[in-house]
Image (cartoon, rainbow, N blue to C red):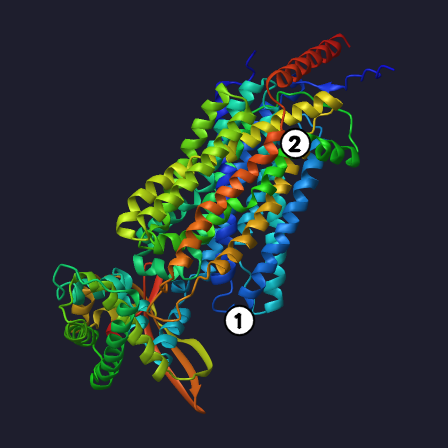
């Protein structure tokens, strides 16, 4: 028996799908709505999360790193030094590159051999970093970095049996970061009950006075880091409190506002 | 045969898929790192516990995604509006997708572990469901953009190339956003923002904007041109059409039989380190392969004009398998010496990438043909469910690949470095050989595997011509009846 022929289904054709005018209007409205949504949500979230907009959060990060963690180098990331400079580049450009001659080692080494030599370097340099911090009572950045790089170059020649050339720049930075981390782990404070509070907000007149009262040395420091005292729009003091071994401590730092962001004023450290 | 699409429509279809792929390609990897590294940074929540729960978050979202493929497919086929059956899903689905995708990168300010976990499960599963409601219909739009199979094949080819490029768009968006942020904020300040995942959040906003702009261009300019049946099809009937249609089943099965071809990506970092000499060369491996994929799609587009889809698929699989085998043999002959091996390896790797043009493009053309065949046999058009069925198989296969890759790395005897100063430990020659096998011969076997079901695919030549002709006659008759009425 022949199969019964299927009845063609009812169809909707293109002419019934003419929605062009609505589509264009909808497109404009949809794009505007989404742009408004994205701008609002992104700006709100960015503002609420980005720590440099809040003096107490900047001070907290600085103190957690410098005061509690004993990591003086990385704490600089929250100071006026970095307003125009990248800390890593500052270290490389001013302290490493002038010391290391161009070139790279031609000695073939397996990863294991390289690892063993780098271990020796780390052992010497970690101990040396701790010595610098202990003996450098002023803890000036310039002194610490200059001494460390000089010692690295000297030790490299002893351990590797060849001079340190520009190709080891990254290794030097890695070694320095490792030394800082080792020192921090050994000397950091086990802080409890931490709190942070803005303890003084400067008025406009007080801010102007703060700018005017900057010493020649402070102005020279500002200039060195590409800053102008006139850029300081606001000043405040934040107190970081914590307890360690049952004793309470307070640390107050001065922060300045440049543009929309707050920084610990490096001239006050 | 008459052409139906405006020239601009072919391009705006591609632009639309580019916009959607820009977001859906961005989300999986970067949402994972956002949850893992940044969302709850600085809170009291233990980051190790977050990391442990993340596989479950992505696992549940994967199940939701696979289920949604089928549900959305069925709903698309039941959609009857003046905008068509597919376009409204894209045009009106883009807005909720934009909102939900953005909210994935807006972490709640909480110290509660339970709250964080609930938020991750809910927001990521919701994103997976909503993205499925836009992406799945967008993928099947090609089947109804024109009744002309040749024109349809061209449109799908071009759109697939755009989609392929869009999927990697995030690789460009992230550094561009980073560059702008550095210029606006300062380099060290950018590092601070980056440390809080804010660059990821802003990059997501850019991808969302791309989705809406490009998606809306598509929505406004493109039309569905294949008439669809107005009668409703039951769920059982729908599933029966899809899973009992031999040709559609064969195309979908390629995903299963070829699931292991993607394991190469698991070991690409090790290939870069041990065969090429630097982990930075992972980009050198993947970028030429990406370019090779785009070039491959252009070649496949040309081949589809000369040969039928079955022949193109089989030839490309044989080519892919052979190129992987050549890569293995050349690497073994040269030896694992990065200085000598790097250049020939990267060159052959580019030619290996050409095969991906086939797997990204030809199945989409085949499914569109299957949609026609089902309509020809049953009188009912099922674009939504046909593409959803293929998408479902793809998602299950992707899950298998994700498990298979790490298992193969264990099989290779790979040894992790225990030394703080050494990132990657020295491996034995046997392990290096096995890593090379995972990158070359094992995928080559699966490339042959994905070819096997297509040997039984017969929607080609005279059969395809007959279907196209008879469908055109039926539609003309139905249109004439409609005008008379």
Disc assigned to residue B46: 1
* The C terminus of chain A - image quarter: bottom left
Q: State the CA–CA distance, disc 2 to disc 1.
A: 47 Å
* The N terminus of chain A - image quarter: top right
Residue at image point 40% right, 71% down: B418
The picture places residue B362, in percent across and down from the top left corner, at: 53, 30
Look at the numbered disc 2 and give the secondary structure of its residue.
helix
Judge from the rendering whether residue B358 lies leftward or rightward of residue B466; answer left or right: left
Q: Nearer the viewer, residue A149 or B249?
A: B249
Q: Nearer the viewer, residue B485 or A170?
A: A170
Residue at the extreme right of the image, as rendered? A1
Q: Nearer the viewer, residue B3 or B422?
A: B422
Chain under label 1? B
Q: Nearer the viewer, mark 2 or mark 1?
A: 2
Q: Is residue A33 visible?
A: yes
Q: Is residue B91 visible?
A: no
* Residue A235 quadrant: bottom left
Chain under label 2? B
**Total numbered circles:** 2
Is tag 2's residue or tag 1's residue first in the polypeptide sequence?
A: 1
Judge from the rendering whether residue B460 lies leftward or rightward of residue B285; answer left or right: right
The picture places residue A261, in percent across and down from the top left corner, at: 35, 62
Instruction: Tell me whether marks 2 and 1 sit on the same chain.
Output: yes
Residue at image point 41% right, 54% down: B433
Residue annotated with mark 2: B248
The picture places residue B93, in percent across and down from the top left corner, at: 61, 39
The picture places residue A5, in percent across and down from the top left corner, at: 81, 15
User: CB of mark 2 within 8 Å of CB of mark 1?
Assistant: no
């Amino acid at each position: 028996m022949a199969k019964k022929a299927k009845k063609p289904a009812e169809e909707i054709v293109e002419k019934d799908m003419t929605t062009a005018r609505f589509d264009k209007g909808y497109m404009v409205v949809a794009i505007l709505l989404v742009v408004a949504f994205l701008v609002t949500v992104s700006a709100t979230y960015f503002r609420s999360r980005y720590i440099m907009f809040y003096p107490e959060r900047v001070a907290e990060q600085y103190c957690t790193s410098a005061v509690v963690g004993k990591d003086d180098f990385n704490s600089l990331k929250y100071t006026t030094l970095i307003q125009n400079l990248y800390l890593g580049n500052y270290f490389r450009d001013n302290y490493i590159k002038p010391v290391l001659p161009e070139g790279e080692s031609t000695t073939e080494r397996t990863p294991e051999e390289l690892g063993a030599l780098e271990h020796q370097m780390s052992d010497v340099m970690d101990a040396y970093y701790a010595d610098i911090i202990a003996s450098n009572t002023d803890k000036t950045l310039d002194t610490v970095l200059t001494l460390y790089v000089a010692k690295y170059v000297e030790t490299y020649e002893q351990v590797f049996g060849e001079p340190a050339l520009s190709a080891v720049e990254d290794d030097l930075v890695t070694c320095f970061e490792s030394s800082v981390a080792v020192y921090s782990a050994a000397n950091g404070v086990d802080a409890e009950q931490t709190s942070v509070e803005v303890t003084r907000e400067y008025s406009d007149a007080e801010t102007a006075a703060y700018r005017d009262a900057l010493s020649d040395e402070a102005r020279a420091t500002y200039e060195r880091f590409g800053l102008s005292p006139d850029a300081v729009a606001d000043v405040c003091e934040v107190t970081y409190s914590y307890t360690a071994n049952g004793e309470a401590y307070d640390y107050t730092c001065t922060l300045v506002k440049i543009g929309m962001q707050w920084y610990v004023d490096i001239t006050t450290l | 045969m008459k052409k139906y699409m405006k020239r601009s429509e072919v391009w705006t279809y591609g632009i639309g898929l580019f916009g959607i792929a820009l977001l859906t390609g961005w989300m999986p990897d970067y949402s994972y790192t956002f949850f893992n590294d940044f969302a709850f940074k600085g809170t009291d929540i233990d980051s190790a516990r977050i990391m442990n729960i993340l596989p479950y978050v992505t696992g549940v979202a994967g199940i939701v995604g696979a289920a949604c493929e089928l549900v959305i497919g069925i709903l698309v086929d039941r959609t009857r509006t003046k905008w068509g059956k597919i376009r409204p899903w894209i045009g009106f689905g883009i807005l909720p997708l934009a909102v939900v995708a953005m909210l994935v990168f807006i972490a709640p300010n909480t110290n509660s572990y339970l709250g964080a976990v609930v938020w991750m499960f809910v927001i990521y599963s919701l994103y997976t469901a909503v993205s499925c409601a836009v992406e799945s219909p967008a993928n099947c739009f090609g089947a109804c953009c024109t009744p002309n199979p040749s024109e349809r094949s061209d449109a799908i080819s071009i759109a697939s190339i755009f989609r392929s490029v869009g999927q990697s768009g995030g690789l460009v968006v992230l550094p561009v956003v980073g560059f702008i942020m550095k210029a606006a904020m300062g380099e060290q300040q950018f590092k601070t923002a980056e440390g809080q995942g804010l660059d990821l959040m802003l990059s997501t906003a850019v991808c969302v904007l791309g989705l809406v702009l490009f998606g809306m261009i598509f929505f406004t300019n493109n039309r569905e041109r294949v008439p669809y049946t107005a009668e409703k099809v039951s769920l059982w009937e729908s599933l029966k059409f899809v899973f009992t249609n031999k040709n559609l089943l064969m195309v979908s099965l390629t995903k299963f039989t070829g699931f292991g071809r993607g394991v190469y990506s698991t070991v690409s970092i090790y290939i870069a380190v041990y065969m090429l000499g630097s982990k930075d060369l992972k980009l050198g491996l993947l970028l030429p392969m990406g370019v090779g994929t785009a070039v491959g799609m252009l070649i496949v587009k040309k081949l589809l004009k000369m040969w039928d889809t079955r022949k193109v698929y089989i030839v490309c699989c044989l080519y892919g398998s052979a190129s992987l085998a050549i890569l293995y043999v050349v690497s073994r002959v040269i030896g694992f010496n990065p200085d000598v091996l790097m250049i020939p390896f990267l060159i052959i790797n580019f030619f290996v990438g050409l095969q991906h043009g086939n797997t990204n493009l030809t199945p989409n053309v085949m499914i569109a043909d299957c949609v026609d065949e089902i309509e020809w046999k049953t009188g009912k058009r099922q674009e939504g469910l046909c593409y959803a069925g293929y998408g479902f198989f793809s998602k299950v296969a992707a899950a298998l690949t994700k498990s298979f890759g790490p298992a193969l790395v264990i099989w290779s005897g790979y040894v992790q470095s225990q030394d703080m100063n050494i990132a990657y430990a020295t491996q034995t020659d046997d392990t290096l050989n096995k890593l090379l096998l995972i990158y070359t011969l094992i995928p080559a076997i699966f490339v042959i595997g994905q070819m096997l079901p297509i040997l039984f695919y017969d929607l080609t030549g005279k059969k395809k011509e007959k279907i196209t002709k008879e469908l055109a006659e039926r539609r003309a008759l139905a249109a004439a009846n409609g005008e008379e009425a």
